Image: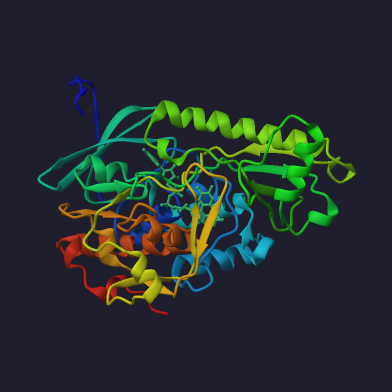
């Protein structure tokens, strides 16, 4: 960074860990749980006050590509089902508070040390080897040493800081639109199963006569199972600003503005929506796309079209390419042939003890638009956690982990 400033500050040195996972979303939670279960001493760093990332803080639903997963993903579906917290929209939606609870229970019973409200703040790395990470929280700044670190931040913050190469966006650098999800209650009886809101919304805007239009052509109302509320996927902001703090802040402000617009338009539209209530916007902005690390394997569109299988395939992805077209109200979908995600796509080139998991793994703009859904992120995280634990226990590089450790037993 050309404007970098060297400062001296007090940093506390914390404990050392076998595995440090940064980011507790679908991939990071699964990584920490898997590494802990495999016997590693694990630290999981999360900036929010819960696990789950987009699953919870981001208020998303439904959960795609869970159906063909074993391991932690399958356990979660079973746990949620047992509490009537799974089902609803397309039979793959869930109650977010139960998701938080089950992730916490699994992490703690695997012996994982959780650090909430803690922001990853930097890395100590030399010649491609990470020695530890700096975090900032209520205690100030602390440094934790880790034998293997897993970057599950979605944005590949740690891998980039450690020197990984990365790319972002399509061939012109444009990224998929961002969305601030939000919850509404008092859903009209006839929409209790969920629906694409576009036509109703356009009619509501037309009635207002203010010249407003829906920011997205496929806005979904997604009812949460066994509840009287729904999550809404509708707002659309420029996705290219994910790594720009001020613009990202204004994207959140704009998302909330769009949410208020929609709510007021629907509420005043007709009798159906008279009980509609606005519950909350998500704690976390929904970023579909930012950095993608360049790894030992780069997943391409051809892999999706050909259904490529790999000896180190950690899971099978079936979800279609789903692109919220940059700077547009459109969505582009394209079918894929079930294909695998190779472990090598989680190994950043040039880094020796770092794994990435989740949406920031190595693949193209188009490929990522398919494998980014959360059933796959959870499976990638589980594989990363197992691999990290194996590498530490056998004193080998994450590159030397045998395929049998990361390949799922179906
Ligand atoms: C609006 C939207 C709707 C989507 N809809 C669906 C859907 O319906 N179904 C589906 O399956 N997928 C959906 N996706 C895709 C999916 O949500 C993501 O691709 C997936 O959550 C990525 O998982 P992840 O673990 O890589 O990252 P995330 O879920 O983003 O988790 C990353 C975690 O890292 C934490 N973190 C980041 N930086 C730091 C830091 N510096 N310090 C500490 N913690 C940090 C974050 O707080 C977060 O908890 C959607 C995505 C978006 C944005």
Q: Is residue 208 left or right of residue 136?
A: right
Looking at the image, the residue that sits furthest to the left is: 127
Q: Is residue 200 left or right of residue 103?
A: right
Q: Is residue 380 left or right of residue 233?
A: left
Q: Nearer the viewer, residue 225 or 192?
A: 192
Residue at 61 percent across and 32 percent down: it is 256
Looking at the image, the residue that sits furthest to the right is: 271
Q: Quadrant of residue 397?
A: bottom left
Q: Nearer the viewer, residue 385 or 355?
A: 355
- Residue 160 image point, x, y percent: 25, 43
Q: Quadrant of the N terminus?
A: top left
Q: Quadrant of the C terminus?
A: bottom left
Residue at 48 percent across and 28 percent down: it is 249
Q: Please indicate, yes or no, whether residue 21 appears anywhere in the rendered image.
A: no
- Residue 306 image point, x, y percent: 37, 76
Q: Is residue 314 left or right of residue 211?
A: left
């Amino acid at each position: 960074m050309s404007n970098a400033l060297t400062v001296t500050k007090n940093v506390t040195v914390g404990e050392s860990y076998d595995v440090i996972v940064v980011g507790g979303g679908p991939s990071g939670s699964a990584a920490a749980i898997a590494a802990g279960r495999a016997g590693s001493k694990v630290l999981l760093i999360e900036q929010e006050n819960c696990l789950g990332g987009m699953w919870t803080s981001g208020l998303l639903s439904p959960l795609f590509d869970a159906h063909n997963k074993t391991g932690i993903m399958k356990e979660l579906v079973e746990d949620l089902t047992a509490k009537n917290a799974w089902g609803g929209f397309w039979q793959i939606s869930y109650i977010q508070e139960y998701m938080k609870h089950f992730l916490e229970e699994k992490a703690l019973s695997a012996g994982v040390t959780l650090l909430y409200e803690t922001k990853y703040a930097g890395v100590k790395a030399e010649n491609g080897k990470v020695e530890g990470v700096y975090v900032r929280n209520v205690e100030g700044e602390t440094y934790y040493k880790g034998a293997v670190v897993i970057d599950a931040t979605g944005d590949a913050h740690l891998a980039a800081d450690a020197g990984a190469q990365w790319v972002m966006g399509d061939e012109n650098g444009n990224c998929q639109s961002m969305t601030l999800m939000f919850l509404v209650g008092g859903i009209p009886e006839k929409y209790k199963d969920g629906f694409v809101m576009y036509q109703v919304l356009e009619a509501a805007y037309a009635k207002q006569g203010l010249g407003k239009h829906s920011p997205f052509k496929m806005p979904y109302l997604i009812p949460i199972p066994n509840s009287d509320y729904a999550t809404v996927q509708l707002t659309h902001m420029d996705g290219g600003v994910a790594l720009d703090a001020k613009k990202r802040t204004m994207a959140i402000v704009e998302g909330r503005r769009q949410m208020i617009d929609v709510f007021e338009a629907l509420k005043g539209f007709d009798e159906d929506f008279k009980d509609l209530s606005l519950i909350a916007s998500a704690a976390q902005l929904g970023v579909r796309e930012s950095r993608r690390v360049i790894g030992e394997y780069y997943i391409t569109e051809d892999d999706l079209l050909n259904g490529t299988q790999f000896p180190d395939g950690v899971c099978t992805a079936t979800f279609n390419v789903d692109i919220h077209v940059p700077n547009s109200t459109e969505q582009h979908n394209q079918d894929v042939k079930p294909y695998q995600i190779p472990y090598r796509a989680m190994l950043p080139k040039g880094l020796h003890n770092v794994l990435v998991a989740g949406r920031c793994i190595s693949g193209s703009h188009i490929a990522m638009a398919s494998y980014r859904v959360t059933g796959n992120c959870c499976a990638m995280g589980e594989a990363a956690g197992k691999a990290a634990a194996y590498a530490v226990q056998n004193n080998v590089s994450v590159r030397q982990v045998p395929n049998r450790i990361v390949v799922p037993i179906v």
